Amino acid sequence: MSARNSKRCLVQANERTRRTWYPVGLKLLEGKKTDPKNKHSLGDKTIADVCEAIMGAAFLTHNVPGAWKSQDWTNAVVAVTKLVGSDDHTMIEWSDYSKSYEKPIYQVAEARGAHLELAKQVEQVHDYRFRYPRLLRSAFNHPSYPTAWSDGIPSYQRLEFLGDSLLDMACISHIFYNYPDKDPQWLTEHKMAMVSNKFLGAVCVLVGFHKHIRQNSSITTALIDEYVEELEGAEKVANGAKDFWTTVKDPPKVSSK
């Protein structure tokens, strides 16, 4: 048998196997019965992709944009609790998560005048009002800022971890629901652009947040000043173009956090 014929027979055999394959342990309700001799292996990535797709389908089933209800996610919370199987995770309802969370001492401590002034300045550029000004101060504390000077307020690193996830969710929800005809590649590329350091760094400078960063590095200071000057120069010669921020170099990592 020639190599070509051998390859053709192998492909045909695989196609027959896939058509009659069915997961072990599940009862086939309709269609052709499976042959126990047939085997069909799935790669790790395929299995992971299917799991992610199932989670996406479950999310779309219950999520209603603009009308989120915690009770719709009770089954999901119970499922996670059973899957984790830990005494540290006993949540049964969505509200149990907030009940089990204890706000850190630095967050709820009495805010000083400097903290209140920072909140006042930041709130001038948007409508959100911060209940805990010390938490806001943490969002602007660079890891290089000495602990002895921070009044017990940590750097932004933990908040950055949380913010990354929230930003991803907000951007993904926006483009997924508003562009139902776009393919996965388009969705991925636009999501990456929306959460990129380059874009977030430009937003930080344009709203003036970079002025509130506390850090203790002359190199970082010089990098921020250089980036701000270049970005503002690009905006002036952009003639109203919205994508002027793409023409400048990447911002210092601190300004995109």
Image (cartoon, helix red, strand yellow):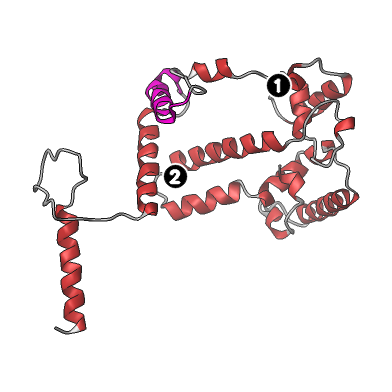
Within-10-Å neighbours for mark 1: few <14, some 14–19, many 20+: few
Outermost front residue: 87
The three-letter amino acid code for the residue at tag 2 is Tyr
Q: Does the magenta stretch include residue 170?
A: no
Q: Position of residue 193 (x, y in %)?
A: 59, 51
Within-10-Å neighbours for mark 2: few <14, some 14–19, many 20+: few
Q: Mark 2 points at which residue?
A: 179
Prevailing secondary structure of the magenta residues = helix
Of 194 and 132, the residue lying toward us: 132
- Asked if one can make out residue 243 in the rendered structure from this viewpoint, the answer is yes
Q: In which quarter of the image is residue 166?
A: top right
Q: Residue at (76%, 39%) from the top-left corner?
A: 207
Q: In this view, does 71 lie above or below 39?
A: above
Q: Mark 1 points at which residue?
A: 104
Which structural element holds mark 2?
Answer: loop
The three-letter amino acid code for the residue at tag 1 is Pro
Q: Residue at (61%, 46%) from the top-left corner?
A: 195
Q: Give the range drawn in magenta.
A: 68-86
